Amino acid sequence: MRERHKVALTWRAPEVFAQRAGLQEEIKNLRRIKSEKIKATRGDPSKFLVEVCKLQPYNYQLDLAELYRKNQFLAVRWPRQTGKSTSIGAFLLQDAWENPNFNIAFIGPSWRQTKNNISIVSRFCHNLQTQGMHLQKTRISLPNGSNIEAFPNNPDTIRGRTFHRVWWDEANFTQNDQDLYDAILFTLGTTNGKLVASSTPFNTDSLFWKMCNHEDYHFARHHFTWEKAIAPNGPLSQSMIDLIKSQFGEDQAHWRREMEAEWSQDEDVWLPQSLIASCIGTIKNCGEDLQPWNPDKGYEAELFAGLDLAQVRDYTVLSVFQRQNNTLRLRHLKIFSQPTKYAHVLGYVKTLQDRWNGFQKIRVDITREGPSFISDMEAAGIKNAEGVNFSLPRKSEIASLLKQRLNNGQIFYPHLTFDKPYPNDLCSELNVERYELRKDATLTLNHPNGTHDDVFWSVALGVYATVDMKEIDLDAMRFG
């Protein structure tokens, strides 16, 4: 057996201390270099985007920076996926970093929206000197005493406050926009501060439309279409543009809003944009800044659900509403990825049912799948499921109930945007359905080729789950 020799460990203190001193000196040099780079960005948005935000700025971003520097009021309309939120957030962070004791407010249609913008800016903060900096979900506190804070859509939360800058994001989707605008102006009064309003266009009877078009609103305006953001002049590739075009199909109004940043609406839409925007849930109109529920947590409430089924061409969508004080509040929206496996859908609905203490009723579109799907739901332990065949009269009844409840101010939903399984937002999904009056005075509903109306019908089914389903009276369904 080979004998092991013990190796003596020698403590060489001078060498260790020398290495430590060398590392400390290297850290000091790195901090000094970083500090010098940050100082060199002062007053230069282009350098700030490169050194702090780690972004290579495009010309249209620098054009916006110049307008922001020269104007007190600025309205921004950019196409989707061109860096609007990133750019505005970066310019406001630079302003806060270079001006001590600045107070900056992020405002939007929901607190969720403004907190998302705080998270975007927080990522840039890690490239600044972080000593004395505090990053929270709703607030960024900088070492120079400046603060950036997220607020919900509620004028009462900002009344009496003083701000140097306000960023009002998705202004076109903000409920009670005039009240909020009045409150914002008072917060900027003593500082002669700046307001940046940005949004994707939606309904024309909005304050954001006036900011961008009306002579009485003295806003500088920055607007361009998707062509200006094609690589190498922007982040959009031609293949991405082709993909988005295919997703929008024949819905040219949607394309104009999203990619040309222009207002547009077809005359034959079932739910007008102004009606859809008016039902975004806020503290002002429903008593809370409506947020989707976490499907991993437990809740107890009076719940109703709508399930629109599809597997390959379209999407399976589940909507869950809570009935509260004679109103319906959308608490959950799940769009299943393609190709959809119904076993996964059944498992998801069963889990949600057990976690949320059951549904009063689940209305399911069984037009393609037939009554056997309801049997599968029952076999899986899902209770209170009821199938609906989408005949023309039944679809008219369901869509009419949805519109009636929206008009009566009885339905509220969060301002939802999503990237998967395809990029869109709830308001645009509800705006997709078109109608036509036939010669016999009955109503037909459809959607443009290449688009999806699964979210619309899932939401409509969720609302329809709150009433009794009766035999259709064809004469009663005639219009005119």
Image (tube, helix red, strand yellow):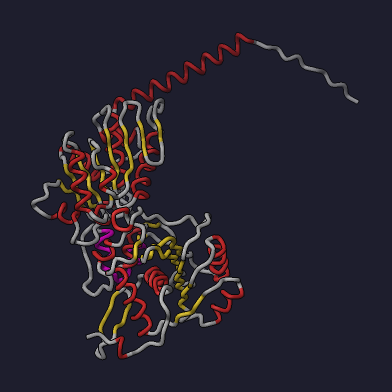
Determine the residue located farthest toward the front in the rendered image. Answer: 325
- Please report the bounds of the magenta region as a residue range: 243-259
User: Does residue 232 show up?
Assistant: no
Instruction: Give the vertical position of 463 relative to 140 (above or below).
Output: below
User: Does residue 381 show up?
Assistant: yes
Q: Is residue 109 left or right of residue 213?
A: right
Residue 436: x and y in percent read 26, 81
Q: Quadrant of residue 160?
A: top left
Residue 309: x and y in percent read 47, 73
State the predominant SS element of the stretch in magenta.
helix
**In the image, is residue 249 part of the stretch drawn in magenta?**
yes
Instruction: Give the vertical position of 401 relative to 130 (above or below).
Output: below
Q: Nearer the viewer, residue 268 or 466?
A: 466
Residue 194: x and y in percent read 19, 39
**In the image, is residue 327 part of the stretch drawn in magenta?**
no
Q: Nearer the viewer, residue 102 or 434?
A: 102
